[in-house]
Image (tube, helix red, strand yellow):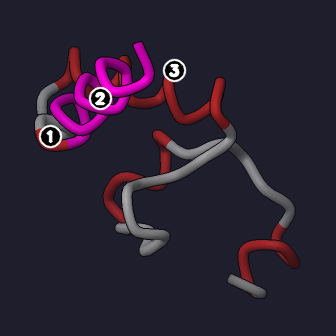
Amino acid sequence: VIEELQGFYKETYDKRSQAGARETLKAFQIALDCCGLKGVIEPQYMDTCPKKPVLELLSQ
């Protein structure tokens, strides 16, 4: 099951420029409190990430 979820997340992440996939990605990332695959946050997709305090974002 974990591998299936990881695969679905990666597929969704790869399609993040599409509106439907973007909303699914946002739901995943909020539920899992994560943002992206490698820890590098792409500015154009910040809206899909969970909201973090400004100080926490600066320390990443």
Residue 47 falls left or right of residue 13: right
Residue 4 falls left or right of residue 32: left
> Which labelled disc corresponds to residue 17?
1
Q: Main secondary structure of the magenta part?
A: helix
Distance from disc 3 to disc 2, alpha carbons, whole Å, reads 9 Å
Q: Are marks 3 and 2 in contact (CB under 8 Å)?
A: no
- Indicate which label's residue lies in the foreground, 1 or 3: 3
Q: Residues within 10 Å of mark 2 (few under 14, many from 20)?
A: some
What element does badge 3 sit on?
A: helix
Q: Amino acid at mark 3?
A: Ala
Residue farthest to the bottom? 59
Range of residues picked out in magenta: 1-13
Residue 51 falls left or right of residue 27: right
Q: Is the C terminus in the top left, top right, bottom left or bottom right quadrant?
A: bottom right
User: Tag 3 or tag 1, which sits nearer the N-term?
Assistant: 1
On the image, the x and y values in percent for residue 50 come to: 66, 42
Task: Using the rendered view, name the quadrant where residue 1 is placed.
Answer: top left
Distance from disc 1 to disc 3, alpha carbons, whole Å, reads 15 Å
The residue located at (51%, 20%) in the rendering is 27
> Which labelled disc corresponds to residue 22?
2
Distance from disc 1 to disc 2, alpha carbons, whole Å, reads 6 Å
User: Tag 2 or tag 1, which sits nearer the N-term?
Assistant: 1
User: Tag 2 or tag 3, which sits nearer the N-term?
Assistant: 2
Q: Amino acid at mark 2?
A: Arg
Task: State yes or no: residue 40 in magenta.
Answer: no
